[in-house]
Image: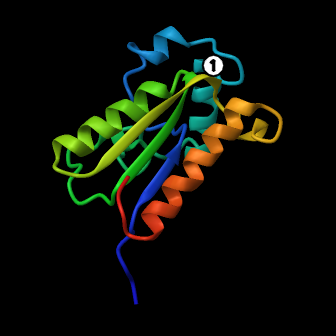
Amino acid sequence: HPRPAIGQVLIYPELGGDKSAGSYVEHAEAPLLTLSDIEFYRQVRSGKTQSPADPTFLPLRDSDFSGLPPTVVVTAQCDPLSSDGEAYRDRILAAGGRAWWYEEPRLVHSFMRARKTVPRASEAFTRIVAAIATLGKGEWL
């Protein structure tokens, strides 16, 4: 039987935010992910056939953020995608939903790969696991 999602946890997602503002500008050439990289990965994900206006591809292009499950978004401070997390949280909240965004200070995109060697990344991983556990119990942060 299909059941609604009890939550979603997004880790440094690309959601289709404004590339002319915020972290897209401030961290355009960040280590491990640049604006050029983002464009490359968009092409890979879309197979060059999916429209960037399609909200199933880039959720911030949607106009309706109601009905989404409780959402946790974790981004890295030194990442061009960080502003996407903030914008997604804001739109969900404006639609009456539950959303929480945390920007991990002084970390870069893909920091999860360093969770065994970088203490700050390990702490972020612990927060993410705790958020998943909380949502899994049907609770909110």
Q: Which residue occupies the foreground of this view, 69 or 124? A: 124
Q: Is residue 87 left or right of residue 111?
A: left
Q: Position of residue 58 (x, y in %)?
A: 41, 41
* Coloring scheme used: rainbow
Residue underneath mark 1: 34
- Residue 11 in view here: yes
Q: Does residue 32 lie above or below 88 as drawn?
A: above
Q: Does residue 20 lie above or below 6 as drawn?
A: above
- Could you classify mark 1 by the number of other residues whose Cα lies within 10 Å: few (under 14), some (14-19), or many (20 or more)? some
Q: Which residue is farthest right?
A: 117
- Amino acid type at mark 1: Thr
Q: Is residue 118 left or right of residue 8?
A: right
Check disc 1 and report its element: helix, strand or loop. loop
Q: Does residue 25 lie above or below 9 as drawn?
A: above
Picture residue at 34% right of the left edge, 38% below the top: 88
**Residue 86, located in which quarter of the rendered image?**
top left
* Quadrant in the picture for the N terminus: bottom left
Q: Which residue occupies the foreground of this view, 140 or 49? A: 140
Q: Position of residue 89 (x, y in %)?
A: 32, 39
Q: Position of residue 20 (x, y in %)?
A: 39, 13
**Residue 127, located in which quarter of the rendered image?**
top right
How many marks the image carries: the answer is: 1
- Residue 16 in view here: no
Q: Is residue 51 left or right of residue 108?
A: left
Picture residue at 52% right of the left edge, 59% below the top: 132
